[in-house]
Image (spheres, coloured by chain):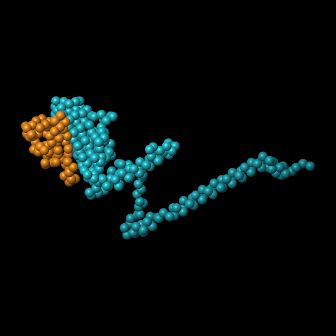
Amino acid sequence: MRTFYCPAHGVTLIEDGQGGRKIILPQVGMSNRSIPNDCALLTCRRPQAGKLIRLDTNGFNTGQFCDVVEQ
Amino acid sequence: MANTPKENFWESIFQPDVIQYLYQLLQQQQQATQAMSQIAGQLQAVAGELAAVPTAQQAAQETGASSGRLAMPLPTLSLPVSPKTINEMILSVELSGHLFIDIGNLAFTCPAMQTTTASLPVFPNTVIVYGSPLRYVASYYSSGITLSLSVDGKQVVGVGGHPYLLTSSGQAELGQYFYSRQGIEFSIVNNTNTDTTISVFGEAIYIDREFFDLFFAPLMSYGYNVLKSLAAIVNGGHEIS
């Protein structure tokens, strides 16, 4: 199981290593509730070399890595 | 000795059947008089009530002749109230700190051959009332992709709780006035070889939990109990548990 965290938006992604993953959105304050759709963890794919691959809006590989923290 | 024509006339008048007929006429007349007396009494009662209503001139004097405004009757509220009415009341007054409205719009990637779960928790001490169905679109559709939706741990989409097949965009009808205390959880199973990005959006009204518990919920409970009592009266006294 691997857990990734987006420090910019407080989103957590848990990969269970068996084809399942869980996105946990933060319980942030009401004033900064919105999470942009381009948050790294919401638009990324499976880990590769300790990082997550960022996808475009069509789900294709952009060749970039997401700016997330593996915990 | 033969009777005179005058005596013949009175004899013909005082025949038993004629007297009976005249007696019936008298009775009907008495009944009509009594009915008219009753109507007159009712009219007097109405006149007394009308006398208590201020005239336009009196009302203007009470509210201030200088303003020239007339006294308006207090508005009446029909009960039982509906969730729609309460939502409209809540949204039409400024309740700073008690609620805010968010058009939620989230997109998350669901990689091929993976199950993706996304949790949208409710803030502490907050209740969400949904103002619209949750709509969803995806970058790739297939019958191999399913979407499930749970509110407060209860699966709410599809007939019999079966997940939606993501063969097209659509909307999950939670019921426009569905509310949640814990949160929504989306679960997408992508059994295809293609990644898909799913966007979900809808209107959520975040209400302070204390305000919800002390205002919204009691009114809803009252409305439900009124209707339950009414149903019991109609069906002969059998009240549902």
> Which image quarter is the C terminus of chain B in?
top left
Q: Nearer the viewer, residue B1 or A3?
A: A3
Q: Residue A63 placed where, x, y %? A: 7, 37
- Note whether residue B96 is visible: yes
Residue B176 against residue B44 in the figure, above or below:
above
Q: Quadrant of residue B185?
A: top left
Residue A55 drawn at (x, y percent): 12, 38
- Where is residue B165? Give x, y as percent: 25, 32
Tell me the shade of chain A: orange
**Is residue B70 depicted above or below B77 in this figure?**
below
The residue depicted at 80 percent of the width and 47 percent of the height is B16
Residue at point 17% right, 45% down? A11
* Relative depth, front residue between B49 and B159: B159
Q: Which chain is cyan?
A: B
Is residue A61 rendered to the left or right of residue B130?
A: left
Quadrant assignment, res B63: bottom left
Residue pictured at 22% horizontal, 36% vertical: B188
> Which residue is rendered at x = 26% and y = 57% of the image?
B97
Q: Nearer the viewer, residue B213 or B70?
A: B213
Q: Is residue B57 left or right of residue B133?
A: right
- How many numbered tags mark residues here? 0
Q: Is residue B202 above or below residue B162?
A: below
Residue B199 seen from this side? no
